[in-house]
Image (cartoon, rainbow, N blue to C red):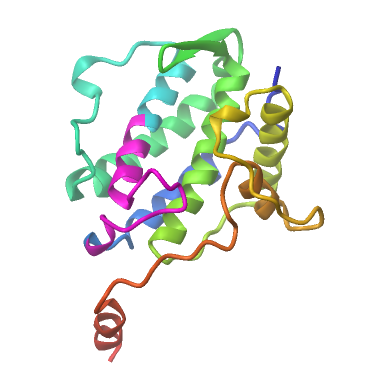
């Protein structure tokens, strides 16, 4: 069984992800992401859903019907306003020691609270990187948080729960912790976003 991550503070990862949202261009919503089944819009929808689900996992309560994001919810009023608030609420919920105790439920699956917290941290780090790369932004994450996510993901894979991620991508053993985490979670650390036609010219024009 995977152990609890070495860091139990989701605040930093939540803040880094939230900061990316301000600079996501609507032209990028249909762009691909390193998480191959998701476009940027899909990824934002997924973040809306997971931040809600894992907050309720922390508080061990059920999601109310009016809370669930509507289908196709990654519109400006959701991912620019609702998602930052949900990220803050998620981090606050997991700051409570009781969130990490006992058993909880995520997506209809029962699991230990500490394991749910580890997955929540991983989701923020990995999907934060996905969003940063897809929207051509630099990715920033505290080294201690990356190490905690790597430790937890290694436990997850070694315990036979590797199906939670894509097929692993081989990276050198001496690669940075972030690259090893990404490879273990089925991501290519060298992934880059394809150019959006006309986007470079638009950015150049705005910079003059």
* Residue 78 part of the magenta segment: no
Task: Using the image, determine if residue 168 lies above or below residue 177.
Answer: above
Residue 83, percent from left and from top: 31, 41
Residue appearing at x 44%, y 49% in the figure: 17
Residue appearing at x 73%, y 57% in the figure: 176
State the extent of the magenta-drawn residues as a range. Answer: 27-49
Task: Using the image, determine if residue 145 lies above or below residue 159.
Answer: below
Residue 84, percent from left and from top: 34, 43
How many numbered discs, if any?
A: 0
Q: Where on the picture, by quarter, is residue 145?
A: top right
Q: Where on the picture, by quarter, is residue 164?
A: top right
Q: Name the foreground residue: 192 vs 116.
A: 192
Residue 78, percent from left and from top: 22, 42
Q: Quadrant of the C terminus?
A: bottom left
Q: Is residue 42 left or right of residue 90?
A: left
* Residue 33 part of the magenta segment: yes
Task: Using the image, determine if residue 77 lies above or below residue 54.
Answer: below
Residue appearing at x 41%, y 53% in the figure: 33
**Residue 97 makes an appearance in the image:** no
Task: Using the image, determine if residue 167 lies above or below residue 111.
Answer: below
Q: Quadrant of the N terminus?
A: top right
**Residue 177 makes an appearance in the image:** yes
Residue 101, percent from left and from top: 61, 12
> Which residue sits furthest right?
174
Q: Name the foreground residue: 95 vs 19.
A: 19
Q: Is residue 22 left or right of residue 155?
A: left
Q: Is residue 118 left or right of residue 25?
A: right
């Amino acid at each position: 069984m995977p152990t609890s991550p070495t860091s139990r503070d989701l605040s930093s990862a939540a803040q880094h992800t939230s900061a990316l949202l301000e600079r996501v261009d609507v032209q990028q919503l249909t762009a691909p992401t390193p998480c191959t089944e998701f476009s940027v819009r899909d990824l934002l929808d997924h973040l809306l859903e997971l931040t809600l689900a894992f907050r309720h996992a922390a508080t061990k309560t059920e999601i109310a019907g009016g809370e669930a994001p509507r289908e196709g919810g990654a519109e400006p009023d959701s991912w620019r306003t609702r998602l930052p608030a949900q990220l803050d609420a998620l981090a606050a919920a997991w700051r409570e020691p009781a969130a990490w105790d006992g058993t909880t439920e995520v997506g209809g699956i029962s699991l230990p609270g500490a394991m749910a917290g580890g997955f929540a941290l991983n989701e923020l780090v990995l999907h934060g990187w996905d969003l940063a790369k897809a929207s051509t932004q630099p990715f920033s994450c505290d080294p201690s948080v990356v190490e905690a996510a790597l430790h937890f993901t290694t436990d997850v894979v070694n315990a036979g729960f590797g199906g939670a991620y894509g097929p692993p991508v081989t990276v050198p053993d001496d690669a940075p912790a972030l690259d090893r985490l990404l490879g273990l979670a089925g991501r290519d650390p060298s992934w880059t976003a394809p150019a959006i036609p006309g986007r470079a010219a638009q950015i150049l024009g705005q910079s003059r």
